[in-house]
Structures are given as structure tokens and as C-alpha cells.
Image (cartoon, rainbow, N blue to C red):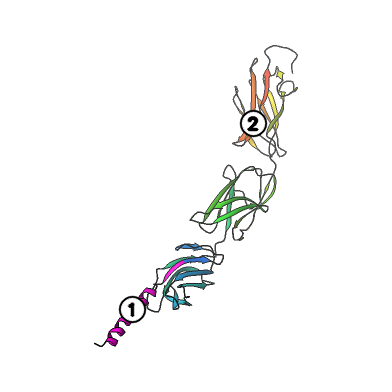
């Protein structure tokens, strides 16, 4: 073998070795939406425009496959990187891979496009778990919200344009929030993605709660009024109070069996308390629910005839 043939063989080996060193197997680095938000493989998303970024041998052409079908061809830059624009992808499951001209194929990156389901407020309930319909009114100022949004994202819960909460969305796409001490008036709640996409509004009128109270009493026998803290000879007293229209509840005492009350359409109730014992003092309260309790109202029943009512 001549020296020239030996040199030629060595050069061929060097070129082959250099080519192997510059060969990069195709690989997907990341998938993002049009806002640059990273999309983990296996995600369910509500967008259909993507950027697929990857690496492959520089200055070559690679094919982007979706489920084995070529959907785009991209030139790899001199650094070995490429970006594929995958816009207006169809509803459903997509499995992207990258195929180079040598037939080498990358690992898959999957995503499911589901634009049909939108960020939403699904329901609102009060303290007793009663549903507060959209467009309805309530006297409760403590409300529980539940809704849906893109999984593993953050949404804002907004009331009349003011952000009240930042909420983490679970992998299932569900979120929830508990709002307390809401002021009386009209409220327009929306759930808003950080991209600005908003849910349909959920509107609620929070009415000022009617005062639950015992205003005064009067003796059943003499009909003389009895004010809070006064003394009476009467052992049967009618209590008069205020509540919500048609509100039902119970008047409780520290030393007396309770009695029911039922307010009329104007929010007024009367309740007869009997068998009061002379020489005892009584403290009454009204209760109609866990968050509806009146201030205490007291009387003293006298044991002898003095100038009392």
C-alpha cells in the first residue's frame, strides 16, 4: 500500500469520526403555547397553537410527525436547534415525534386539545350548602365557589373587576374558593385565566340581612309592655321581634324550654313564653341557623307585688 493510500484511509476515518461527533439524535425539548407557557407531555389543554422546540443534527431537515403522520418539515439551524410552529391543531389527542433523514425518531410528546370546555364558575353555595343560582339574591355574605379551568394553571376570582383570590387549579381542572364578609349589593363574579380569558359572569345580589332580635315583650294577662332588663309579675310573656320574612327559628333560654317562632311576610314575629317562675331571671335569644343568632334579651319575674309591670 502506498503512502498516499494510507493517508487517504486515515482521512476517511477522521471524516467519519467527525461526522459521528456532529450527529445529534432528534429530541423534543419542550412544547409551549403561543404565550410561551410550558405544556407538560400528557397534558389536556384548551389551546390549539403550539411551538415545538427540539434538537437534531445541524443544517439538516427533520420531519414533525403526529401519530406517525408527517405534518411539518423544519430546517435545523447551525447550533442544532429547531422550532416548529404547530398552529390550529385539531380537537383530540396528538402524539408528536421528530424524524431525521437517517430514520431516527425521537421520543413522543403527547397533548390533548380540548377547547370545548371553557374556564367557568360551576356553582355557588351558601353556609348551609344551599345553591345560590346565577342572577339570584341571598342574605348570606359567606359563599363557597367551585369551577373549572385548565389543569395546573392559576386563575383569578374577580368581583366587580377586583381580584379577590389567586387560585391553583388541580390536575383534574377543578378549583374552589371560600369568600367571607361580602358586602351587601350587586356582585359580578368571574374566573379569569392569567392570559386574560374570562368565564361567563355569575351575578348575585347580597341583601342586607334583616335583624334577628327580640324588640320587647308584654304580659299575656295585662298587655303591659316589658323592655329588656325590666321586672314583671307576669308568668306568661309574649315576645315580639324582627326577622327575615317567613323566617323560622327557636327562642332559647338559659332556664326555660325553648319555643318556636315564625315571622310573617313583614319579618315580625310573636311568641308566647309560659310558666315563668317568680324570683327567677331569664335570658332569651333567637336562633334560626348557625350564623343567625340574636342579641340576648333579659327579664326578671318578681316574687312579690311591687311597682312593676
In the image, residue 168 sits, relative to residue 100, either above or below, namely above
Q: Where does the N terminus fall, quadrant-wise?
A: bottom left
Tell me which secondary structure the magenta stretch mostly adopts. Answer: helix
- Residue 169 percent coordinates (x, y): 53, 54
**Mark 2 = which residue?**
286
In the depicted view, which residue is nearer to us: 105 or 132? 105
Question: x and y percent of residue 165 in the render?
Answer: 60, 50
As measured in the structure, the alpha-carbon distance from the residue carrying label 1 to the one carrying label 2 is 96 Å
Judged by depth in the image, the label closer to the viewer, 1 or 2, is 1
| The C terminus sits in image quarter | top right
Residue 308 is drawn in which quadrant?
top right
**In this rendering, does residue 33 appear at all?**
yes
Q: Nearer the viewer, residue 6 or 23?
A: 6
Q: Which residues are magenta?
A: 1-29
Which numbered dot is residue 26?
none
Instruction: Categorize mark 2 by other alpha carbons within 10 Å: few (<14), some (14-19), many (20+).
Output: many
| Residue ID for mark 1 | 14
In magenta segment, residue 27: yes
Residue 217 found in image quarter: top right
- Tell me the element at label 1: helix
Estimate how packed mark 1 is, as few (under 14), some (14 to 19) or many (20 or more) residues with alpha carbons within 10 Å: few
- Residue 67 visible? The answer is no
Q: How many numbered markers are drawn?
A: 2
| Residue at (49, 66) in percent of width and height | 31
Q: Earlier in the sequence, mark 1 or mark 2?
A: 1
- Figure check: 289 above or below 37: above
**Picture residue at 27% right of the left edge, 84% below the top:** 6
Farthest left residue in view: 1
Where does the image place residue 244, in percent across and percent down from the top left? Answer: 68, 38
Amino acid at each position: 500500500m502506498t503512502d498516499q493510500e494510507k493517508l487517504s484511509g486515515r482521512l476517511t476515518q477522521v471524516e467519519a469520526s467527525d461526522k459521528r461527533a456532529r450527529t445529534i439524535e432528534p429530541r423534543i425539548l419542550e412544547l409551549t403555547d403561543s404565550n410561551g407557557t410550558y405544556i407538560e407531555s400528557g397534558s389536556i389543554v384548551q389551546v390549539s397553537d403550539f411551538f415545538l422546540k427540539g434538537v437534531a443534527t445541524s443544517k439538516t431537515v427533520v420531519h414533525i410527525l403526529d401519530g406517525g403522520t408527517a405534518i411539518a418539515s423544519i430546517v435545523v439551524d447551525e447550533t442544532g436547534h429547531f422550532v416548529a410552529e404547530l398552529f390550529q391543531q385539531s380537537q383530540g389527542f396528538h402524539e408528536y415525534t421528530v424524524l431525521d433523514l437517517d430514520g431516527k425518531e425521537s421520543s413522543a410528546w403527547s397533548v390533548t386539545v380540548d377547547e370545548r370546555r371553557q374556564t367557568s364558575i360551576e356553582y355557588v353555595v351558601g353556609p348551609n350548602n344551599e345553591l345560590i343560582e346565577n342572577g339570584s339574591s341571598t342574605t348570606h355574605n359567606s359563599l363557597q365557589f367551585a369551577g373549572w379551568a385548565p389543569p395546573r394553571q392559576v386563575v383569578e376570582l374577580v368581583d366587580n373587576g377586583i381580584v379577590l383570590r389567586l387560585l391553583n387549579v388541580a390536575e383534574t381542572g377543578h378549583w374552589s374558593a371560600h369568600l367571607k364578609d361580602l358586602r351587601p349589593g350587586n356582585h359580578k363574579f368571574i374566573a379569569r385565566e392569567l392570559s386574560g380569558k374570562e368565564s361567563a359572569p355569575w351575578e348575585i345580589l347580597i341583601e342586607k340581612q334583616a335583624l334577628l332580635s327580640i324588640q320587647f315583650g308584654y304580659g299575656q294577662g295585662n298587655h303591659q309592655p316589658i323592655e329588656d332588663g325590666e321586672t314583671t309579675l307576669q308568668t306568661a310573656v309574649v315576645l315580639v321581634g324582627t326577622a327575615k320574612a317567613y323566617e323560622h327559628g327557636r327562642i332559647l333560654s338559659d332556664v326555660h324550654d325553648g319555643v318556636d317562632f315564625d315571622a310573617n311576610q313583614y319579618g315580625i314575629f310573636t311568641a308566647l313564653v309560659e310558666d315563668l317562675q317568680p324570683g327567677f331571671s331569664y335570658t332569651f335569644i333567637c336562633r334560626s341557623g348557625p350564623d343567625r343568632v340574636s342579641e340576648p334579651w333579659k327579664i326578671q319575674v318578681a316574687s312579690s307585688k311591687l311597682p312593676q309591670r
